[in-house]
Amino acid sequence: MTGLRATWAARREWFNSTDREQRIKDYVALSNQLVWQRQASFLAAALLTAFYFDPVVASICYAGVFMSELLDQLLGARARAWDGKDPKVGARLLKSITINTIVSSLAIGVFVLSIAVQQTSGGHFTPLFFLFSASLFAAMYNSQLVNILVLRLSIYGLTFLAIAFLDVVRYRPEFSSNIWLEVFTILFVLYFIIDTSMKFYKSYQERLEQMHRIQEEAERTKAAYEIKSQFLSTVSHELRTPLTSIKASLDLVSTGVLGEVPATLTPALSIAAKNSQRLSVLIDDLLDLQKMEAGEMEFNFKKIDVNHLVEEAVESTEGYANKVGIPVTTTLSPAPLAIHGDQARLMQVMNNLLSNALKFSNEGGSVRVHVTSNDNRVRISVQDDGVGIPEEARSKVFEKFSQVDSSDVRKVGGTGLGLNITKQIVDRHKGIIDFESERGVGTNFYVEFDQVIEEANEQLLDERLPLTA
């Protein structure tokens, strides 16, 4: 029994904070969105009433409805300014909404009832239709706050009953009279409005509960993601220190600093050195990926000379290119080209593209780097003579842990993270990365960025000034 009380207390506390704020916000937002539709219908009803009945009564009643609408707008401004943190403010808002609902409902009820009183023959189709429209409007758009919905519909319901029995009191008709038929029809309409209100209220409840479930799932996902990121970062950092010692020791042994290495150990040391290098690259990539996903990777954007960037990147991979025996040629832009970017991160992009091109080029092939511009866009292309990428693998190329090598048995190693990290860096520069490939012929990866036009023109002008002096 104590547990049940605690559960209900928790539910009430939850409703009094988060749920109440959401309901008030939804109620006010929807009311403000539909203000012009309501005013248009009220004005049309007032004009019709003024023409066919007493214009003074119609004007007074419409003024009351209009004033209640102004109160709703003032209340809406207060609700939008509420941050949801102070429950006392929420309680005052609910109290104000209740008062405004009473004023608005009574104004509409009096308006409709005045029409019915003036209409002495031909039934009460016009006032009943106006009241039915107002009730249906409340059922559809006041379902966020059930107490407000019940209050408004109660006032409308009493007005319905007053109109229904108005002619009964006036004429005291026989039970077989059409007046009684109208009474029973109005009762049926009341049932329809109540049933419709319940359906809209249940629908809103389901949407609200679904939203809460989504929010809870998002919180759990966020917590799991943070734990994963912390774990990944911790493990990567903890692996880096011993791995550095292992690599240094292997280098000392392999170079003979610690003594002559027996010929039988040379292959094993070579394999160990290669795998330690692969593990080091994997750790670096995992750290970069973790920083990217956590939004912790810093970017220092400044003007960058594209030709110089490419020359520096090709130079930095020269050692690896000589090792694999694949020449790298460059075709730079004849005119200086500038982009906004982070020099270190764009070097990482170029190194990834160049290393992939060198790894997957066939023996006797080459790697070509081109810098071009078109329509204020700068393109850097890296083309190889490798195995190519099948079209069906295009969607997987930039995914995490995806290998560009399309063969069943990969001839080169890799983390499968390089191109994913590259794409994220390019995206942060608001650029694009894509490729063109043909099986057995090669692949052409390219990146494109917006060109810095004004700065490039200033640099061109500076270079031409000595010639005109």
Image: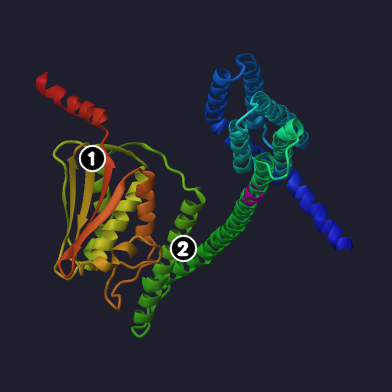
- Identify the mark at residue 283; answer none if there is no mark: 2
Residue 307 visible, this orientation: no
Q: Is residue 394 among what the camera can see?
A: yes
Number of callouts: 2
Q: Is residue 308 left or right of residue 114?
A: left
Which circle's residue, 2 or 1, is located before the other in the chain? 2
Residue closest to the eye, 159 or 260? 159
Query: Looking at the figure, which quarter contains the N terminus?
Result: bottom right
Of 442 and 160, the residue lying toward us: 160
Q: From this view, report whether residue 85 is shown above or below residue 68.
A: below
**Residue 43 versus residue 264 in the image, above or below:** above
Task: Tell me where residue 243 appears, x and y as whole percent.
Answer: 49, 67
Q: Residue furthest top?
A: 56
Side of 445 relative to 235 (left or right): left
- Magenta range is 195-199
Q: Mark 2 or 1, which is nearer the eye?
A: 1
- Please tell me whether mark 2 sits on a helix, a strand or a loop: helix
| Mark drawn on residue 377 | 1
Q: Which quadrant holds residue 363?
A: bottom left
